[in-house]
Image: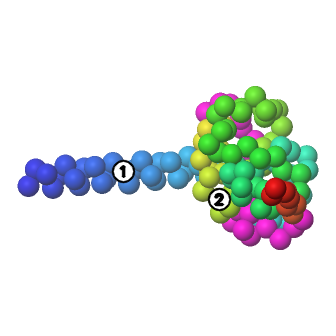
Amino acid sequence: MTELYILIGILIAFILFTVYRYFKQKKILKALTENEFREGYRKAQLIDVREPKEYDGGHILGARNIPLTQLKQRLTELRKDKPVYLYCQNGSRSMRAALILDKQGYKDLYQLQGGYKKWTGKIKKTKKLDY
């Protein structure tokens, strides 16, 4: 019976942590529709947090690739005084990126609602030559 109470306690703690993190993300990261995103990203830092192979397969024109896995090491590439527009494939990695950026003092954070897979605007593909 004690094991059941421990398991229930762990489950409740996990649920509370997940809910807390969800609301924290919503507070620090504003999700924008494609039109809203398109209106503001040229005046901001447009960051694709997907992995390089995903980026090379197609990305929003003007985006820089800083994969989520490298973000902490590459923070010096981002300015705190300019808005940061983030996107990934569907939105989950950009949310995690926003948590990292918020901890480092970045406050003007936005993400593309639905991620790159919902983007209908101009894209660029990086061609890799195979020898």
Residue at 73% x, 43% y: name it.
66
Near-viewer residue (89 or 33): 89
Name the element at disc 2: loop
Q: Is residue 60 above or below residue 68?
A: below
Residue 35 in sight: yes
Q: Quadrant of the C terminus?
A: bottom right
Q: Position of residue 43 (x, y in %)?
A: 91, 46
Residue situated in front as seen by the camera: 18 or 90: 90
Q: Which residue is mark 1?
A: 14
Span of residues in magenta = 102-122
In the image, is residue 73 above or below residue 40? above
Q: In the picture, residue 69 is in which quadrant?
A: top right
Instruction: Give the Cα distance between marks 2 and 1.
Output: 21 Å
The type of residue carrying mark 1 is Phe
Instruction: Say left or right for 32 vs 20.
Output: right
Would you say residue 60 is visible in this rendering? no
Look at the image and name its color scheme: rainbow
Which element is circle 1 on?
helix
Q: Amino acid at mark 2?
A: Gly
Q: Position of residue 17 (x, y in %)?
A: 42, 47
- The residue under label 2 is 91
Q: Residue furthest left?
A: 1
Q: Picture coordinates of residue 63 (x, y %)? A: 84, 50
Label 2 with label 1: CB-CB less than 8 Å:
no
Q: Residue at x 77, y 62 (%)?
A: 57
Residue 64 among magenta residues: no
